[in-house]
Amino acid sequence: MRKQFIIPVSGQRGLTFLLATAGTALFWICGLPLPFLFGPMTFCLVGALVHLPLKGFGQVTVAARTILGVAVGASITPEVVAQLPRMALSVALIPVFIALIALVGVPFFRRIWGFDAPTAYYAAMPGGLQDMVIFGAEAGANPRILSLVHGTRVLIIVTLAPFILSHFYGVPLSNPIGAPVTDLPVHELLIMVAAAWIGWKGGERIGLFGASILGPLTVTAALSLSGIVHVRPPAEAILAAQFLIGCGIGVQFLGVTWKELTRVVAAGIAYVVVLAMLAAFFSGLVTALGLGTPVASFLAFAPGGQAEMTVLAIVTGADLGFVITHHLTRIVIVIVGAPVLAAIIARGQRD
């Protein structure tokens, strides 16, 4: 009997890092957009699909999300807060947006793709991947299906959104993401590191959903509004966050079988088309009513991940406060409402 060679986790992560670095370098040399995001994402995705022994970076990737939380928090200034009443009407459309997604998405997965009721519901909801998998598993849904459907959604949205922004909106993806670390005051860098750590771990301690982003966002926003923090994290930190997030999206597809590709991933791809039509309608409505600029409205209703949409808002120079306010509202509604509505659906099925 042949002894199977098992690569240690450190070796798997080393291979992932080398593959992601090669992807970044190739995208950079070829002048492709967002090389630190798309290079790792593309190469790790291909590596996962051909069954290379890759491994995500675990808590390091989670820690990278704190950088984006700090970046958003630092962008919340008194001027941004003064604009919140202006966003009220467009934010009020988010519950309608979510309701339509549920009305269309649940039957889509239930009747067309044959998912059971809990899996269909949690697959339809455009919440955070980890949140939907956890809540779905508790409700009796299939966590593997949820992981692949939401992973597919994020992958496609993150891939297509920059193309749409540059080719249809005419927006260059070259807005400065931050100053070099050498140009920033050392004391503010230390304050931002402390805000990231305290916000992340403090958020986890009190059970805050999305603690790695929302915790640092909240702490840094308070520091920004009080005049203690005046700058965003350095460019190097935001590039590192892009790199790790790109790796995380790619390795999400590790172990995908042909059966899953032709059923679950195919369902996820088809559903993105449905979501895109709904998002296009609402972003167009917000733009037509003069409630937001075209680019900010597009990003505000794009059903991608919060971290990924934050990156795109930064590189396009969109109104970061507008985009994040809408995404936070969507996430709160989905996470708070998902368990309640799923229980109602399950009770209706029993009856």
Image (cartoon, grey):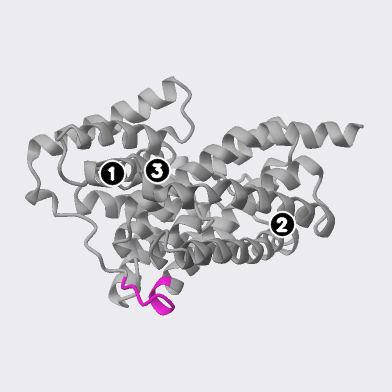
Specify the label residue 264 is tagged with: 2
Q: Which residue occupies the extreme top position in the image? A: 205
What amino acid type is highlighted by mark number 1? Ala
Task: Indicate which disc, 1 or 2, sits on the residue closer to the N terminus.
Answer: 1
**Secondary structure at numbered mark 3:** helix
Q: Position of residue 220 (x, y in %)?
A: 26, 35
Q: Residues within 10 Å of mark 1 (few under 14, many from 20)?
A: few
Residue 282, horizontal then vertical, whole percent: 55, 61
Quarter placement of the N terminus: top right
Tag 2: amino acid:
Val
Mark number, residue 61: 3
Q: Secondary structure at mark 2?
A: helix
* Circle 3 crowding by C-alpha within 10 Å: few under 14, some 14–19, many from 20: many
Q: Which residue is mark 1?
A: 82
Residue 103 visible at all:
yes
Measure how far apart labels 1 and 2 are at the Cα level.
Answer: 44 Å
Between residue 1 and residue 196, name the one nearer to us: 196
Q: Quadrant of residue 22?
A: bottom left
Give the image location of residue 278, x and y in percent: 61, 62
Secondary structure character of the magenta stretch overall? loop
First-in-chain label (3 vs 1): 3
Query: The residue under label 3 is which amino acid type?
Result: Thr
Find the magenta span and give its range: 165-172
Query: Looking at the image, which residue is at 33% across and 45% down?
Result: 68
